Amino acid sequence: MYDFNSSIPADIDRTDDKAIAQYITSQIVGADEYKFGWHKTRTVNEYDVRGIPKYLASAKCLVFKCTQRQRKWARPDDIPLHKRRCKTKMQRVDCKGSLHVYFLRNCMFPPPLERAHDARPHIAFVYNHTPHEGRSAYGVPPILREWIRNNCGRTPYDTWEKMMSAVEAGEFAGLPENAYYSQRHVAYWHRKAQVQRFATISADSWVNMEALLKQDEKVNRFISI
């Protein structure tokens, strides 16, 4: 990539290689709606260049990997079973996709690259990725989460009852037939929607908490004299 600095947005620091590499990554994989996370930063050893062109020797390389890659989660055995979270594991795709962004500094380019452009190349990247489906949603589907956020009732039960009535009436497209969602799942998103809504009442967190508790029918208000 030649003269890349002229195309970088103004809010990105030209001296921050990681920010520039993240911008490049978002432009490359964003169109396909994939997500790549930063993995590591290394400098290419000029005495051990294998699998890449020799002119990338001494370049600074930032490696990004697809977020759907399989990982082994280590859970310590000293946590009692009754204190562990009962959570369904997220289904991931065994993706080996990666994106290497090279910042070329004092590199020796072959004659074809030297003559290809008036300026010297600044950045090179190697993109290796196979298209695949995204991670499947579990629990309450995103379309129902949005509905709960916009139609949050007074109590979690009210929200759950209205939502299940809408589900049984077929108001949501893409849900499986005879779908059922427990009150426990709905209660989490109900509470989260309430907190987000009442957080905008005032800059004082105590005022927001008071308004939130007044909506809970299980909270009794006592006036002390």
Image (cartoon, rainbow, N blue to C red):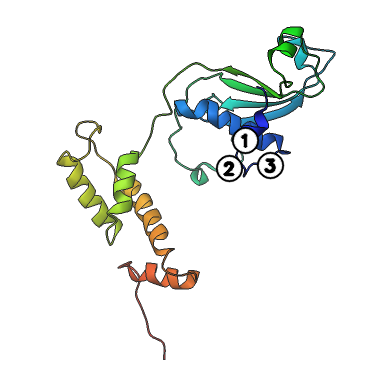
Residue most toward the right? 47
The residue tagged 1 is: 8
Label 3 to label 1: alpha-carbon separation: 9 Å
SS for dot 1: loop
| Image quadrant where residue 71 sits | top right
Q: CA distance from mark 2 to mark 1?
A: 48 Å
Q: Which mark is residue 79?
A: 2
**Residue farthest to the left, as pictured:** 169
Is disc 2 placed on a helix, strand or loop? loop
Seen in the picture, residue 134 relative to 215 is either above or below; the reply is above
Q: Position of residue 26 (x, y in %)?
A: 55, 31
Name the kind of residue labelled 3 in the image: Asp
- Asked if the residues shown at circle 3 and circle 2 are in contact, with their CB atoms under 8 angstroms apart, the answer is no
- Residues under numbered marks 3 and 1 in contact, where contact means CB atoms less than 8 Å apart: no
The label nearer to you, 3 versus 2, is 3
Tell me, yes or no, if residue 32 can be seen here: yes
Q: Is residue 206 left or right of residue 99?
A: left
Name the image quarter holding residue 120. Answer: top right
Mark 3 Cα shell of 10 Å, populated few (<14), some (14-19), many (≥20): few
- Going by the numbered disc 1, the residue's amino acid type is Ile
Picture disc at residue 13: 3
Nearer to the camera, 211 or 220 = 211
Tell me which residue sits at (60%, 30%) in the image: 24
